[in-house]
Image: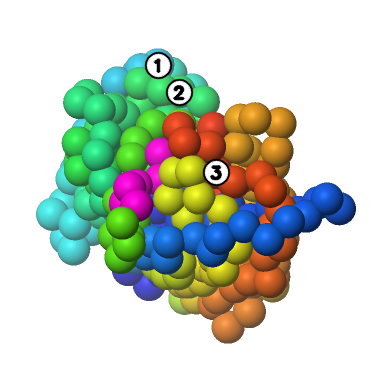
Amino acid sequence: MHPNRFIAFTAICSAVVIAGCGGSNSVSPSPAAGGTLGFTGSPTSSGNATSTATVPATGGVTVSTSDAGTGGTAVVPSGALPGGSTVDSSTQLAIIPAGVGFPGTFGGSSQMGVNGTSNSGVGVTTGGLTASNIALPVTPGSAGTLYTLTFPQGDIDTNARRAHPNILTIRELSFTGKFYVFTNPLRIVSPVPTNLAGTIPNNGQNAVGSHVTASFGPGNDGRSATLLINYGNGFALRQTRTITSSLANFTDLTYDRVSVPQTGVRLVSFTIGDL
């Protein structure tokens, strides 16, 4: 996220946990229990490093930043730049505040993966939220800088209102898209949703009746938003929408006899196209 809002990621995210189905041999299963998707988003701000640091191959590095709104420090994660790269005042940063993610139950010592580096230095609390401010170096201009932010396995608390388990287990949840920094005036365009709202299934339930709306910060209109859900049992759902008025609505989901496995889904990915 502050001109614009971060994830999970992601949502990934997220709008990313709706799990509909489709097929020619459809039957009519019972509707999903109506679990409510929870996501804690926050605006992404722009800034520069006010201290020089070298980014290690693993573990990340904390730098002082010009962004007083997030307390003036942030972790530049390993994976954001090649190990040994230097971050200084010439590096433009997209700064995502701590506390972003999906409330639920996560393992201790979990970390957010950044561009395939699992030991990024950005911790994820046992409650599912990022533990530090994140500073992502971004090349100014229309080329943008591509990131994949991955949340670890966890049980997303869906706050179900019926007598069913109120969790959706996701083994991997990723957000992929370019961050853009423009000048004159200075503005950030972040691919990570600022909010995700809707109704989703829990473990073992069918997705009929599910719907999710992803909200984004300014500047994202016209970008594609693709949701991919891999159940891990040979079934996957892919759906693409266009961000309009800062929203992407994942609705009109089909269904069949394939329901979310009792153990949850293997992968939920949320990919935002280029400007």
Circle 3 is placed at which residue position? 260
Tell me if residue 171 can be seen: yes
Distance of mark 3 from mark 1, alpha carbons? 37 Å
Q: Nearer the viewer, residue 215 or 28?
A: 28
- The residue positioned 70% from the left and 38% from the top of the image is 235
Q: Are marks 2 and 1 in contact (CB under 8 Å)?
A: yes
Label 3 amino acid?
Answer: Val
The mark lying in front, picked from 2 and 3, is 3
Tell me if residue 180 can be seen: no
**Residue 232: x percent and y percent?**
61, 30
Splitting the image into 4 quarters, where does residue 123 fall? top left
- 214 vs 26: above or below: below
- The residue positioned 55% from the left and 76% from the top of the image is 247
Circle 2 is placed at which residue position? 117
Q: What element carries label 3?
A: loop
Residue at the right extreme, as displayed: 24
